[in-house]
Image: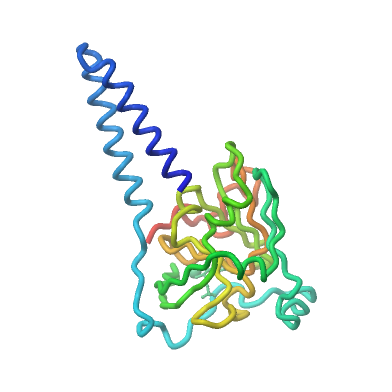
Amino acid sequence: MRRRNVLIGMGAAITAGCSRIADSTPGAKALAAAEDWHRKAQRLFAARTALAPEYDRSAISPSFRGNGSLTVDSDAYRMALAQGFADWRLEVRGLVRHPLSLSMDNIRRLPQRTQVTRHDCVEGWSAIGEWTGPQLGTILEGAELLPEAKYIVFRCADRLRGAPYYESVDLIDAYHPQTIIAHRLNGEPLPERNGAPLRVRIERQLGYKHAKYLTTIEAVASLEDIGRGEGGYWEDRGYQWYAGV
Ligand SMILES: Nc1nc2c(c(=O)[nH]1)N[C@H]1C(S)=C(S)[C@@H](COP(=O)(O)O)O[C@H]1N2
Ligand SMILES: [Mo]
């Protein structure tokens, strides 16, 4: 939402600037260039904010398989799982005015979104599931991003082949209406293999962006100093950072 207003504001500023210079010849050229830029920006923005298809509940796959890490290999996680994640905390930190430490109860009490969507993994399988949780945008509004924040990093509890799993998105995807912090799958608390107790859903992108076993949401200005600097576990190993479907 915030990002949207920023973009609309930029468009408005250009329009106002151009009407002042529209009658001089170089001005007319600048106007045409600005209009062209504006049209392209709008088209790009419309493409990035479009909704992923949502399905009827009857389309839900009988079983939503697990992929990558299927659990977190630590005593702390096993204990948390046994206790129904009563003490699990989601930290929101980095370039925010109000760092947050949210309990599962806090998360369940926020306004919720439920969406039936198709998950596409690069390994060549898909599954349709119904996900429920608060929009990431709601959480970020509570934390209040600082102006320097450009990316949102998701840190996870698991390690895959020895390295911590993590992911990141820009602010357009962070505020996309279908970007949610899911705690339910098909009406039940998130199963262990699918990332209990919390996982990200980023419905316009491929499966590896949907970080499971989420522990921390961090607002940053640059991805350079995280992992190997490419913005995600699989990105550090050659996959695309923007993985549109
Ligand atoms: N923390 C964490 N998140 C992860 C992974 C992982 O190994 N660890 N694997 C990713 C990949 S490649 C896919 S396809 C999906 C699989 O989600 P699922 O286990 O619910 O099917 O999770 C993604 N998120
Ligand atoms: Mo995947």
Up-down relation of residue 147 to residue 151 (above or below): above
Q: Indicate the quadrant where residue 36 lies.
A: top left
**In this picture, residue 123 sits left or right of residue 51:** right
Up-down relation of residue 18 to residue 56 (above or below): above
- Between 1 and 222, the residue placed more toward the observer is 1
Q: Where in the figure is residue 93, as x and y percent of width and height?
A: 68, 50
What colour scheme has been applied to the protein in the rendered image? rainbow
- Between 219 and 120, the residue placed more toward the observer is 219
Q: Indicate the quadrant where residue 154 lies.
A: bottom right
Up-down relation of residue 173 to residue 150 (above or below): below
**In this picture, residue 120 sits left or right of residue 47:** right
Q: Indicate the quadrant where residue 130 lies.
A: bottom left
- Residue at image position (72%, 69%) is 88
Name the residue at the bottom extreme: 62
- Residue at image position (21%, 18%) is 28
Q: Where in the figure is residue 44, as x and y percent of width and height?
A: 33, 45
- Residue at image position (52%, 55%) is 137
Q: Quadrant of the C terminus?
A: bottom left
- Residue at image position (21%, 11%) is 24
- Between 228 and 25, the residue placed more toward the observer is 25
**In this picture, residue 220 sits left or right of residue 78:** left
Q: Where in the figure is residue 207, as x and y percent of width and height?
A: 47, 67
Count of numbered badges drawn on the protein? 0
**In this picture, residue 156 sits left or right of residue 231:** right
Q: Where in the figure is residue 1, as x and y percent of width and height?
A: 45, 48
